[in-house]
Image: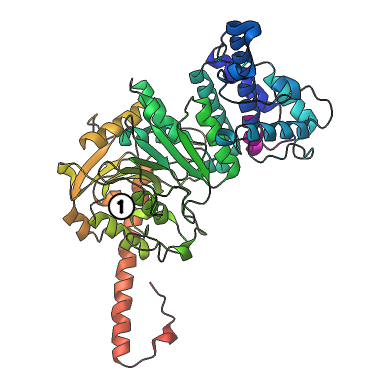
Amino acid sequence: MTITQQELESRLWDAANALRGPVDPADFKTYVFPMLFWKWISDTWVYEHDAAFDEYGDDLDEEIEADFHRFELPEGTLWSEVTEKVTNLGAEIAKAFQRIEMANPRSLAGVFGDASWGNKERIPESALLGLIQAFNKIRLDPSTVSHDLLGAGYEYLLKNFADESGKKAGEFFTPREVVNLLVGILQPEPGESVYDPSCGSGGMLVATINQLRESGKDHRTLRVYGQEINLTTASIARMNLFLHEIEDFDIKRGDTLRAPAFKDTTGAVRQFDAVIANPPFSLVDWGADRWTSDPRAICGVPPTKNGDYAFVQHMVSSMKPGSGRVGVVMPHGVLFRGGAEAKIRQGLVEKDLLEAVIGLPPKLFYSTDIPACLLIFRDQKQAGRKEHVLFIDGSARFENGKKQNRMSEKDVRILIEAYQTGNDPDGKGGANARLVPFEEIEQNGFDLNIGRYIKVAAEETADLGTALIEYADARQKRIEAEAFMFQRLAAADIDLSMFGACDE
């Protein structure tokens, strides 16, 4: 008997709510997802066992049955066998997870994360029993829940956990309309490779698969790769991909900027057809000391206290010659900040790698209220866009929300079309677009602030854009005036140290 998506979502949320009270909502995901994944592989194992017995009857042996199972579950690790234990239940669950991971080293090593299941202060047995009882009401084998339904249920939980977690949600969840916009712009094709260097819960990688499925293309030949620094989040990403019936993937845990996990035989970073990410904004401690001789610093070393352009350069270095393209979410500051970032920005434009700058609506993200944009890079631009950058103002394409604004499917579709055509599809100024020649950008000192090139639509963003431009202009004039003053003072043999001149 199958259940509806609404029924599944309701039961999954009931399971999560069993933890409410003793467990902080920001930690729900740490416990709910491993239990959901275990329940799924356990129910599916029983379903596969019954199918094997129906076909072979008393002739069924271990060798034959092994062909029916995707995962091996050692004796004593099934959901029904463990959850009936009456003492030290958390510790027994942890043992079962460890045994399952050891029995499936190539596919499931570390997949259950590092939650302290035996720590009764973190998760009291009463909460654990409530979680188990809630999951006992859901049967998660293929006869009841399809992969599409289960994947949608997983996404539903991620969204709800993000809502509960507030700003912490930015560490693992990107609003799905932003994900769909990026995927729609990059358009991964069957047989290609897709890489997310800060993959969070795997939403962008899942979206690439879903886009191919929905367009009727063969998604099975798409290869997806991701790296994530947080162990729990990396585990959630792997479970997410498994539950969406994606098998050809590789998620590695680690610090992408300090120790990129994907390399080719020469030791250089591996290259992919599509590179997509929403990395953490403006990381302070990102490992700048290691980048002075890093080949990824193709246009210079980013500032010690801001890693935005380190992620950009890593992603550009990771795109494959010819087919490679990059889509990355960034704060607006990358468009105009000076110093080392200005030199990197100039280098990327001069190398003709930057294809588009797309301004997003305000207040879309959980982690920050500051405006964000998409930067699109391409190894080989189409003829009409060479030595140009396409600017799109999508700041007005949103619907107001209480805590966050959101973009509708129509908003996303219009911005994708604006990117593809270089024009405003609905002609109402809701997605202003302009293809700007290199010479004009050079005249503006390689400042990429959208308001310099097109009229910004959303009032809130317009005010910010105007303020940023005025600030940048005033700052530049001050720097030039100081340089002239210090030059005159030096010519007069006056000691400049007494003025405390700052190093720009």
Above or below, 263 relative to 199: below
Confirm whether residue 256 shows in the render.
Answer: yes
In the rendered image, residue 278 lying in the magenta stretch gets the answer no
Amino acid type shown at disc 1? Asn
Quarter holding the C terminus is bottom left
Q: Main secondary structure of the magenta part?
A: helix
Above or below, 15 relative to 450: above
Residue visible at 57% across and 28% down? 157
Which residue is under mark 1? 449
Q: Position of residue 115 (x, y in %)?
A: 68, 39
Confirm whether residue 405 shows in the render.
Answer: no
Q: Position of residue 360 (x, y in %)?
A: 37, 41
* Residue bounds of the magenta highlight: 23-33
Residue situated in front as seen by the camera: 329 or 451 = 329
Q: Position of residue 147 (x, y in %)?
A: 50, 20
Q: Position of residue 474 (x, y in %)?
A: 32, 65
Above or below, 164 relative to 385: above
- Residue 35, by quadrant, is top right
